[in-house]
Image: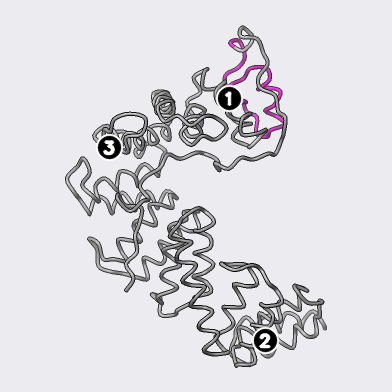
Amino acid sequence: MILVVGCLWGTGCAAAPSSAVDASPAANVTGAAAPSASASAAQAAPRTSSCKTIEECRPECAAGNPDACYKQAIEGAGSSEDRVGWYRFACDRDHAAACSELGFRTGRGLGVEKDDQKARALYEKACSGGYDEGCKNLGVVLEQGRGGPKDIGRARALYEKACSGSDASACAALARLYDKGLGVDRDIAKARELFRQACDRDDGSGCNDLGVMYRNGEGVAEDAAHAIRLYTRGCDLGHALACVNLGRTKMDGADGDVNLGDAARLFDRGCDDGLEEGCDELKVAVARLREACESSASQCNNWGYVHEFGYGVAVDLQQALALYKKACDGGNGTACTNEGDLYLAGNGVPADRAKALTFFKLGCKRGDKRGCQQSEEEAAKGK
């Protein structure tokens, strides 16, 4: 059995400050101006806004409304530097969520010079303003000693505060302290319950780490099927490590069926999100797919699949078609159906519905249920 790891202390994936938006710079609107109202006008401007779109928020922000400036930044208006300016404008006017976002960007050097001390101070201000994510983020930098000395005791208190409020990821961060006994007596049962709370409240890291417990039998009976469900939920919620751990279950056949193609897809997702272990696992999966195809024609289907979609290899539709054909000729019904998909969509080949239907029927004949469904649907269209 392959032991999988979660976001547990010492594994390189401890809690990290979070942002309400994707950290990557967006450019939905370029050249956007910062608020231009005078200081007196800005003080007199409304402090909250009901605006929902960049277009609605822009004039209110220009008139000095800090909430409108925060909202248009969250929506991705302007450049990364523009957004930093809007967050700073709003934070200077005690908009707690804006302070947390500005802290997140300052701690990573996104549109502003990286400065851990300033990030820590901004999280402090956000937390003091009652913003739960700011409290969680302050807890993270205190736990890790970024921008100042470590203080795990205060970090725990902040996680508890944010967890009891609106930040589910704080529940997972608190769970990791109990799981490893950091600043508290080790309590696996409490950790498990906190991971469950986080997962139930749609935090992908909580689902992943709870999955690790069930996969490895840590404080619970080992249950691969439940672990797979938890990894799937975590991955669906956008947690990259959950996708990688789910890929590992596909690669080692934890559900009774080794699926290297699906494993490659999941590892590729983790790799794209910057997880080095996702990239490493992807290389292993790609090598095994190549070897499987070389050993048996019927095993070339998944090797064709990664070429069609570019998982760990360059997209090559001609190679994908050739590999699907080889696997189909070798008796793999799924490969016949995949070959039909390419002809139906005209991917890498001229669109040919009649040829697609032939391959769908062949896939069905060789036991592929999707081939049966596709052939029935295409036959119905021709009536």
Whether residue 372 can be seen here: no
Task: Give me the C-alpha separation between circle 2 and circle 3.
Answer: 57 Å
Compare marks 3 and 1 and give the one earlier in the sequence.
1
| Distance Cα–Cα, label 3 vs label 1 | 30 Å
Secondary element at image label 1: helix
Q: Are marks 3 and 1 in contact (CB under 8 Å)?
A: no
Q: Does residue 132 appear left or right of residue 348 in this picture? A: left
Query: What residue is at 46 percent from the left and 54 percent from the top?
Result: 239
Toward the top, the furthest residue is 40
Q: Is residue 348 above or below residue 203?
A: below
- Disc 3 or disc 1, which is closer to the eye? 3
Provide the secondary structure element on which disc 3 rests.
Answer: helix
Answer few, some or many: residues within 10 Å of disc 2's Cα (few below 14, many 20 plus, some between 14 and 19).
many
Q: Earlier in the sequence, mark 2 or mark 1?
A: 1
Badge 1: residue crowd in 10 Å (few <14, some 14–19, many ≥20): many
The span shown in magenta is 43-69
Circle 2 sits on which residue? 325
Left or right of 49 on screen, residue 214: left
> Given contact means CB atoms under 8 Å apart, are the residues at marks 2 and 1 in contact?
no
Q: SS for tag 2?
A: helix
Q: Which residue is mark 1?
A: 67
- Report the residue at 43% width, 25% height from top: 118
Percent from the top left, x then y, of residue 347?
75, 72
Give me the residue at 62% from left, 83% from top. Answer: 335
Inspect the magenta stretch and tell me whether residue 52 lies in it: yes
Amino acid at dot 3: Arg
